[in-house]
């Protein structure tokens, strides 16, 4: 059982910044995300796009903003459960919660902050019979640890950047890599397409186009695929099959947690602290709704900041917290680090 003060569901910018604000209040955080990497929409949808409306950054790449947020929260040593979807929430008699993921990992906390954005990003699965029987037994929709493919036979399907990037990467790791796409043209970056072509010419990868995987075979685990090209079917032996057809966000399990939902988002009390209809559960960032709501990163940062004030009261009942500027108080990391402004430059104002 993972124990923490604030359990954050969603590692998008809102969830990440909540760790910083909680850290200033000496509250520990743990974050769950269905994706294998932090950053939410910024990492998954537009990592290379510039953002122009982050205060103090005239221009910042989405991926760069995520890197900065990760850097900013490092000293507060957040825990991460990545690649797992928060599935159920159970409220205990003492008012605390147990959140269990789809992989069975259990987390216990007195405060839950749902920062789930548009919902958890779920892989688009190919319509193949019995595909769920082979999940984690040869079929995966994300690559969390490329080392598991070392010296194995791997088939990747898809025509976008992920399919191309992983084919190129695994060419040096796996014993055999085959890329299958239903068209001859790829939608990925030009240099990735060229690199894949070069690897094929060198015999380091196999390319099968236009083709589709139509059947899966294997007893205990995946052993082979049927591939159809121009109406001709052939059997392809493989250890792993990785369909990379993109991800789609789904509100998913959050819709079944007894929370008040409006317009596919969680209704919160925006007059105070973004708490939901269940005391102790807050919803911040794109996932919430209230009059005047704007789905912007800076609004998520603001909501995370106010939420932490109420979380402090739940974790430390009766204890008074007086807000201090970081320029005055400095930042004390849980790892023993300390950042503070030189005393001669900043004086405290009582
Ligand atoms: C193309 C594009 C451009 C944009 N440009 C801008 C811009 O210029 N400026 C701006 O301010 N905003 C912009 N936005 C909007 C901005 O990206 C969102 O406001 C922001 O990502 C919201 O952050 P968040 O942390 O609330 O949610 P998200 O970034 O959506 O992160 C939520 C995370 O929660 C996870 N999650 C959800 N449910 C679960 C669950 N049950 N279990 C585990 N994990 C779960 C998801 O996997 C996801 O990683 C843009 C959006 C897009 C798509």
Image (cartoon, rainbow, N blue to C red):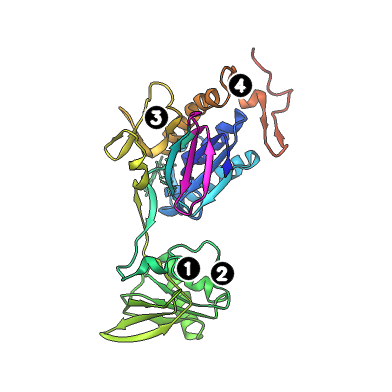
Residue 153, how many percent across, how many down? 50, 79
Residue drawn where x is 54% and y is 72% of the image: 149
- Between disc 1 and disc 2, the foreground one is 2
Q: Using a 10 Å C-alpha cutoff, classify the residue at mark 1 as few (fewer than 14 neighbours), some (14 to 19) or many (20 or more).
A: some
SS assignment at label 1: helix
Judged from the image, the secondary structure of the residue bearing numbered disc 2 is helix
Alpha-carbon distance for marks 1 and 3? 43 Å
> Is residue 58 visible in the rendered structure shown here?
no
Q: Is residue 313 rendered to the left or right of residue 41?
A: right
- Mark 2 neighbour density, 10 Å: few (under 14) some (14–19) many (20 or more): few
Q: Is mark 4 on a helix, strand or loop?
A: loop
Q: What stretch is highlighted in magenta?
A: 93-111
Residue at the image position 53 percent from the left and 43 percent from the top: 107
* Between marks 2 and 3 in the image, the one whose residue lies nearer the viewer: 3
The alpha-carbon separation of the residues under discs 1 and 4 comes to: 46 Å
Q: Which mark is residue 165?
A: 1
Give the residue at mark 2.
Answer: 148
Q: Which of marks 2 and 3 is nearer the N terminus?
A: 2
Badge 4 density bin: few <14, some 14–19, many ≥20, Cα 10 Å:
few
* Residue 277, position as x, y percentages in the image: 36, 28
| Residue at numbered disc 3 | 278
């Amino acid at each position: 059982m993972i124990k923490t003060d604030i359990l954050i569901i969603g590692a998008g910018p809102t969830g990440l910044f909540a760790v910083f604000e909680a850290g200033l209040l000496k509250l520990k955080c743990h974050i769950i995300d269905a994706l294998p990497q932090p950053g939410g929409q910024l990492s998954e949808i537009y990592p290379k796009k510039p953002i122009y409306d982050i205060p103090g950054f005239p221009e910042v790449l989405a991926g760069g903003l995520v890197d900065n947020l990760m850097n900013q929260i490092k000293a507060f040593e957040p825990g991460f459960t990545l690649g797992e979807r928060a599935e159920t929430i159970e409220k205990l008699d003492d008012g605390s919660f147990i959140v269990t993921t789809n992989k069975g990992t259990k987390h216990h906390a007195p405060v839950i902050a749902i920062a789930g954005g548009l919902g958890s990003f779920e892989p688009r699965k190919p319509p193949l019979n019995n595909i769920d029987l082979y999940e984690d037994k040869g079929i995966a929709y994300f690559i969390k640890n490329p080392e598991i493919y070392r010296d194995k036979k791997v088939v990747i399907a898809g025509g976008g950047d992920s399919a191309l990037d992983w084919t190129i990467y695994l060419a040096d790791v796996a014993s055999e890599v085959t890329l299958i796409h239903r068209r001859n043209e790829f939608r990925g970056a030009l240099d990735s397409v060229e690199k894949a072509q070069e690897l094929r010419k060198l015999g380091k990868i196999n390319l099968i186009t236009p083709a589709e995987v139509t059947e899966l075979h294997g007893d205990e685990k995946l052993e082979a695929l049927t591939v159809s090209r121009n109406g001709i079917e052939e059997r392809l032996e493989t250890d792993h099959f990785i369909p990379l057809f993109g991800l789609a966000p789904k509100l998913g399990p959050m819709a079944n947690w007894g929370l008040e939902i409006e317009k596919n988002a969680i209704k919160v009390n925006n007059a105070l602290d973004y708490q939901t209809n269940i005391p102790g559960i807050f919803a911040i960032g794109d996932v919430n709704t209230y009059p005047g709501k704007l789905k912007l990163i800076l609004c998520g940062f603001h909501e995370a900041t106010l939420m932490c004030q109420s979380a402090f009261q739940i974790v430390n009942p009766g204890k008074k917290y007086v807000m201090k500027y970081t320029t005055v108080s400095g930042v004390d990391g849980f790892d023993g680090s300390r950042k503070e402004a030189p005393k001669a430059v900043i004086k405290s104002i009582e």
